[in-house]
Image: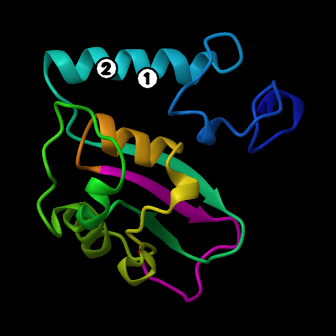
Amino acid sequence: GVIVGNYRTGLAGTDLNRKWKTPDEDLHPTIFHMKGMMERMRDERGIALYVDLHGHSVKKNVFIYGCDSKFFDAAENHPSREQPIELENRLFPAMLGNKCGMFKFEDCRFHVKKRKETSGRVVAWRQFTNNSFTLEASFGGADEEHTP
């Protein structure tokens, strides 16, 4: 979709980040085949980390959306998945916050809202790895000066 000026939708005019649960091979080939590759990787050796990179049009700074373990039993998960350890999903964002001045841990959120169940982050969390995140970078920059 980017080639025709879209920044959120693919050529079929749909938000690809909402097609991860059941992607159509013809309408969403990149998601369909990426998910197939991830299934093979999970079965062969596991997936340590999934990060989906996004630009945020409202909030400032760089931050993460993650999935909290308390939402794990709220929907169906892949049989290979084990209950996540509480607070484990905050380790990667905390490390980013310690190493990158523009990253703001306090802006991170770890909810799994029903409307996000078909997103890459939540589908990857339910089917592939405990460490599944959307890394958001603001289109509007940081809310304060920082020194690299």
Residue drawn at (22%, 67%) of the image: 95
Where residue 49 appears, as percent x and y from the top left, is: 27, 42
Q: Quadrant of residue 58 in the image?
A: bottom right
Q: Nearer the viewer, residue 55 or 125?
A: 125
Magenta-tinted stretch? 132-147
Residue drawn at (29%, 40%) of the image: 77
The 10 Å Cα crowd at callout 1, few under 14, some 14 to 19, many 20 or more, is many
Dot 1 and dot 2 residues touching (CB under 8 Å): yes
- Is 133 inside the magenta-drawn segment? yes
Quarter of the figure that contains the N terminus = top right
Quarter of the figure that contains the C terminus = bottom left
Q: CA distance from mark 1 to mark 2?
A: 6 Å
Label 2: which secondary element: helix
Residue drawn at (71%, 40%) of the image: 15
In this picture, residue 99 sits left or right of residue 57: left
Q: Which residue is mark 1?
A: 35
Where residue 62 appears, as percent x and y from the top left, is: 50, 69
- What's the residue type where badge 1 is placed? Lys
Q: Which residue is mark 2?
A: 39
Where residue 51 appears, as percent x and y from the top left, is: 40, 46
Q: Farthest bottom residue?
A: 144
Q: Quadrant of residue 9 in the image?
A: top right
**Residue 148, labelled with which disc?**
none
Label 1: which secondary element: helix
